[in-house]
Image: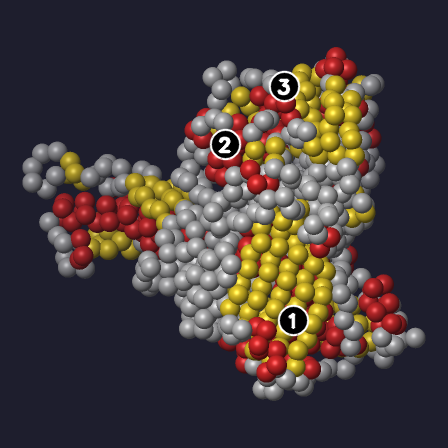
Amino acid sequence: MSLHHITLTINGAVERATVPANLTLLQLLRETLALTGTKNGCAAGECGACTVLLALPGAERGEPVNSCMVLAVECDGAAVVTVEGLAHDHQLDPVQQALLEAGGVQCGFCTPGVLISARALLDRNPRPSEAEIREALVGNLCRCTGYLRIIAGIQAAAQLGAPAGPAA
Amino acid sequence: MLKTHPTPARGPVGESVARLDGQEKVTGAAQFADDIQFGPGLLHARILRSPHAHALIKRIDASRALALPGVRAVVTGEQTPGYIGLYLQDRHIFCRDRVRYIGDPVAGVAAVDEQTAEKALDLIEVEYEPLPAVFDPVAGTRPDAPLLHPDLGQYEAVNFIFPKPNTNISNHFKIRRGDVAGAWAQCAAVVEREYRVPHIQHVPIEPHVAVAKWDEKGKITLWASSQSPFAQRNLIAKALHISQSQIQVVAPYVGGGFGAKAGVSMEALAVVIAGAVKGRPVKLRLTREEEFFTTFVRQGLVARFKLGCDTEGRLLALENTYYWDAGAYTEYGVNMTRAGGYSGTGPYDVPNVSVDSICVYTNHPVGGPMRGFGMPELHAGLEQAMDDLARSIQLDPVEFRRRNCIRGGDTVATGMTMHPTGLPDCIEQAAAAINWGHKAPPSAPTKRRGKGFAIMWKAPAMPPNAGSSARVQFNEDATVTVSVGGQEIGQGTFTVMAQMAAAALGVPYEWVKVAGPVDTDYSPYEWQTVASRLTWSMGNAVKAAALDARRQVLEMVAQAWKENPDDLDIVNGQVISYKTEEARSLKDIVIYGLPNPDGDGWIGGPVLGRGSFMPTYVTGLDAETGQGPRAVVHYTTGAQAVEVEVDLETGKVEVLRGVAAFDVGKAINPEMVKAQMEGGLVQGISTAFFEGLKLKDGRVQNPSFVDYRIATAADAPPQVEAIIVEVAQDDGPWGARGIGEHSMVPTLPAIANAIYDAVGIRMDAPPFSAEKVFMAMRQAGVVQ
Ligand code: FES
Ligand code: FES
C-alpha cells in the first residue's frame, strides 16, 4: 500500500500525517489521531455518526460529509471540524447548548454527527424551517430520541444565533 | 412484602434537572468502548461464521491461516467445551460439532490488524455436512421436525423454565384459569385471528465492541459496550470453569442497547480469542452487517387469538397461543416466552383464560431480549383482535377497553392480585388528548383519516431474586460520589440516581456525580441493565445507601452537638438543628469527622453509605396452570393513540399525531420520562412501517441500513404528546417504576387500528409498507 504525506487543519490545529492510500478520514481521526468524538456506526456512509465538516482547499465553508466515505489522502490541505472543535474557550456552540436543553441527547452516540449536521445547516441557513431541519438530519440516524427533541433543539439554536468562536 | 413508605419528595426528585452526562456527550468527550486507547499492542479479531443454517462440522483445518504473516492465533470450538447461557445453557462460545444458523461462530482469528484477520478467515478450511433445517416455529413443533438440540434434556436450566427433551420446544408456559371451553357458549361475539410478527433487530447506532486481555496469572479484563457487566462476568466465568473474581468487566457508556447488549452475545468470543494470545489486548468489533444477524435479534412470533365477550362487551374468555420463532439458541429467549405467557392476556380482566407460549428452536438468528421483552410482539396482534371484538358488537374500542382493562384489586390470569394502577386514567387521558370520537377531514380528497388506540402492560421479567446495590460516599468538599453497577445506556439512569441520592441526602443535585465506567472490580453488584428495572430496583438501593450515609452524618453531629439525631436534618448541604438552630456545612465533617465534645480526640470519619435491594416476594408458578400468588414484581401500564392519514393512491400512511400516557408511579425526572415516551413511540412507528429481517432459508437478505430502514428525522410525526400518570408503586423509590421499554409496546397496534379506522383493512403482519397497504386496499375493494 502506498503511503502519502498529508497536511490538514483539524479544529484549527495543523496536523501532519503519513497515511496509506486506503485510510479513511474517519480512521485518521479516530485511530491515528485518537480524536474519538467522531463515531463509527456503520463505516458504510449510511448512519451519519461519523459526520464532520470538511472544507477542501479553496472552499469557503465546510460541508458535512460522512468521514467514513472520504479517504484521508483526499484531505491534503483541507480543513476539518469535528465535534471536539465546536466549543470555543469552554463556550459551547449554541447548537450544543440548545440540544442539551431540549433533551435531544440520550445515549449520545449519534450526537456528534447530529451536531455537525446541525451546525452546517445553520451556517448556510440561519433560520431554517422545521422541514428544512428534518431534511438536514435525514442522514443522521438516531435510535433513542425519536428526533423530536433534536429538532426542537436546532430550532432553539437558530434563535440563539451564531457561535462565539472562530469558524473553521 | 417489603414496604417502603414513599419519602416526601425533596429537592431534585420530580424536577427535570439537566442530564448528568449531557455536557460530555455534546462535546465528544464521553467515552464509549471503541474509544478506549490500547496502544500499538492491540490485536484485532474477526470471526469465521457458518454459511449453513444447520450442519455438522466434520473437520476444521486452520494451518494455512496460522501461517499467514500477522496472524497471532486461531481458536475454534475445541477451546470451548463448556456451555453458556442465561436461563438455559444451550450454546458453546464457538461451535463444536454442529452449526445452527447462518452466522454461527466457527472460528476466531487474532491478527495485527483487521484486514489480516479478515484475510485469514478465507484460509480456514471447514468441512460441513448440511442437515435439514427448521424455518418456521409451528412446523418446528411437529414430531417429524428435524431436531436442533438432541441434548436439550441434558442442558442446565433455571427452575422456572420447562424444556421438552427430544423436541424443539425449549420452554412451554401455560395458563389455565376458569372454564374456557364452557365460556364460548355464553359469548355474544367471538373473534379468532392469526398474526405474524417478523424478526427485527435492535439497531443501536453503536455496534457491539469488546476488548479482552488475559494476564499471565489468568486474570481476564473485558472492556465492552455492555448492559450487563456482572452477568457477563458470571456467565463467561461459568462457561470457562473459572471463578467470577478472575474476570473484570469494564463498561463505559453504551451507545444504545435496547437489549442487544444484555446477557452475553459476542463478548465471550473476544475473551476466548484473547486467551490464545495472553498479555495482548484483542479487539472484536462487529460490522454493521454482522449486527443484523450475528448478535441477538428480536424473535419472530406466530400468534393465534380467540377472544369472546358478552353483549355488554365484557370479556368472558381468551384462548391465545404464541409460537415464538426463537432461533438457534434460546438461552435468553426462553424467559421471553415465559413473560409472553404470564402476561399473555394483555392488560385485561378476563375470567376464563388459556394461554400457551411456546419457545421453538429454529435455524434462524438467535432471539434475545429487545425493548419490551415479548410485549410489543404479542400486543401487536392482541390489540388489533380486541378492536375487532369491540367493533363486532358495535362498541367503541375505547369504551371496550374502559370496561375490560385491568384495575387495582383485580385478579390477573396468573392468580396474582393487581396492585393499584393508573391504566384507566391513562385510557381517559390518551383518548381526550387525541380527541377520540371526532374525525377531522383529510388534507386531500385522495386521503383518508383514522384514529387508533391501544393499551399495554409489562412487568420486569427477571429471576425472582435479581438484586441491586449501591454505594454513596462523600468527598472532602462534600460532593458525593454514587457508585452503581447499572449502566447508562441513554435512558438517563445516572441522572436519576444522582437525583435520588441528592434528595435522600439533602444536598444539591449539582454536588452528586455517578462513578463511571461501571467496573465489576469497583462497582457494587447489579444484575443487569434490562427490564426497565433500574429506576425502581437500583433506585431503591441508591436511596437506601444515601439514607445510610445521612444517618451516619446525623449520628455523628448529634453526638458532637449533644443532641438527638431526630432533631437534626441535612438541608442544601448543611446540617441543621431544628432545636438549637445551629448549622454547619457538610464540608467540614464528612471526611475528617468532628472534635470529640467530651475531651480529646475526634469522632466520626469518612462517611460511606451502603444500600441494596432485592425483591423477596415473587413466587413460582404452577407448570401446568401458571397459577401462583405473585408472578411478578409489578406492571407498568399505559395507553397510546394515533391519528393517521392513508394515501389512497400510494398506500403511504402518515402518522399525524401520537399520544402516549403511562403510569410511571412517580416521574423522578419528568422531561426524561417524556423523552422515553417519545423515543419509544417513534421506535414503534419504525417497526410498524419499515422494519423486518427478510429471512430466506435462514439467510438475512437485508443486513444493511440501505435494505433495513429505520425511522429517520423525516418519519417522526409532527406532534407527539406525552402524558405522565402517577399511581405510586408501593415498593418503588418515591413510588417510581420503570418506563423505558413500555413506550414502544402499543404503538404498532394503535397504528394498525388507525389504518383500519381510516380505510377498513387489516394486514396479518407488519411492516405496513405503502406497497402492502395499497395491495390490501385493492384486495378489499377500497381502491381499484
Ligand atoms: S459511520 Fe455510518 S455513515 Fe460513516
Ligand atoms: S441518542 Fe442514542 S442514537 Fe441518538
Q: Is residue B764 left or right of residue B400?
A: right
Determine contact: label 3, label 2, CB under 8 Å: no
Q: Chain of mark 3?
A: B
Could you say which quadrant of the image residue B772 lies in? Answer: bottom right
Image point 53% across, 27% down: which residue?
B240
Asked if one can make out residue B574 in the rendered structure from this viewpoint, the answer is no
Nearest the eye: B565 or B192: B192
Mark-to-mark CA distance, 1 and 3 = 62 Å
Nearest the eye: B140 or A80: B140
Q: Which residue is mark 2?
A: B238
Q: Secondary structure at mark 1?
A: strand
Q: Nearer the viewer, mark 2 or mark 1?
A: 1
In the rendering, at what x and y percent does residue B394 appear? 67, 86
Q: Nearer the viewer, mark 1 or mark 3?
A: 1
Labels 1 and 3: the sequence-earlier one: 3
Q: Nearer the viewer, mark 3 or mark 2?
A: 2
Residue B395's place in the image compared with B573, above or below, is: below
